Image (cartoon, helix red, strand yellow):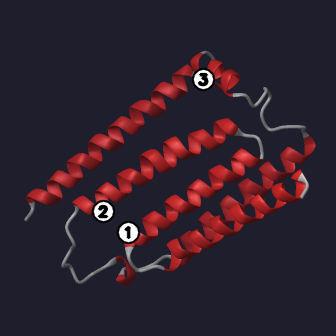
């Protein structure tokens, strides 16, 4: 078997795993199964990044999304009590116009990026290496990096506060 065939098999496998686990997230009723399936989907996306040669994006995907955000979601699920309120999310009033607006704007933004990437050789003006990205984060993009870290800290403190309020309302 040649390397190109192995590459195609791995890429197809990761794509199928990503799509199938994302569909499980959509259609499962139990939130813990959906969260675990989302972890599998995000890990498969990291595998696709690795196959494409974007090691920094793959490691960031694993550390930030799988290691950080989803683990917090699972802890939040495990630590919050089950609500006995009859009014759930599925019975609340929905706004389909808002969904269409968000979907259309997302499609427009992604289409713009797709057409822009066809005009240039790369969306990134620098080499895709981890060392170069680290240098840029610590020099040119230090202020946005610190602002994002403060924002994440505020979100974490807010989630702990909300979880403690739910726990004390017993």
Kindly state the secondary structure of the residue where label 3 is placed. Answer: helix
**Residue designated by label 3:** 137
Quick check: marks 1 and 2 in contact, CB under 8 Å? yes
CA separation in Å, label 3 and label 1: 35 Å
Foreground label between 2 and 3:
2
**Residue designated by label 1:** 32
**Where residue 165 sits: x, y (%)?**
15, 54
**Where residue 99 sits: x, y (%)?**
57, 71
Q: Earlier in the sequence, mark 2 or mark 3?
A: 2
Foreground label between 3 and 1:
1
Q: In which quarter of the image is residue 35?
A: bottom left
Q: Residues within 10 Å of mark 1 (few under 14, many from 20)?
A: some
Q: Considering the image in quadrants, where does the N terminus appear? A: bottom right
Quick check: marks 3 and 1 in contact, CB under 8 Å? no
- Above or below 55: residue 1: below
Kindly state the secondary structure of the residue where label 1 is placed. Answer: helix
CA separation in Å, label 1 and label 2: 7 Å
Mark identifier at residue 77? 2
Q: Earlier in the sequence, mark 1 or mark 2?
A: 1
**Between 10 and 164, the one nearer to me in the picture:** 10
Q: Earlier in the sequence, mark 3 or mark 1?
A: 1
């Amino acid at each position: 078997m040649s390397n190109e065939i192995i590459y195609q098999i791995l890429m197809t496998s990761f794509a199928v795993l990503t799509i199938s686990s994302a569909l499980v997230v959509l259609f499962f009723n139990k939130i813990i199964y959906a969260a675990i399936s989302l972890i599998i989907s995000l890990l498969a996306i990291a595998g696709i990044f690795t196959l494409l040669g974007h090691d920094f994006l793959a490691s960031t995907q694993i550390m930030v999304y799988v290691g950080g955000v989803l683990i917090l979601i699972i802890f939040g699920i495990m630590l919050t009590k089950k609500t006995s309120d009859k009014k759930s999310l599925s019975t609340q009033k929905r706004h389909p116009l808002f969904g269409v607006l968000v979907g259309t704007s997302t499609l427009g933004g992604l289409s713009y990026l797709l057409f822009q990437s066809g005009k240039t050789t790369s969306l990134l003006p620098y080499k895709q290496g981890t060392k170069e990205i680290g240098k840029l984060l610590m020099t040119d993009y230090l202020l946005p990096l610190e602002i994002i870290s403060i924002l994440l800290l505020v979100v974490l403190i807010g989630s702990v506060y909300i979880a403690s309020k739910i726990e004390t309302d017993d």
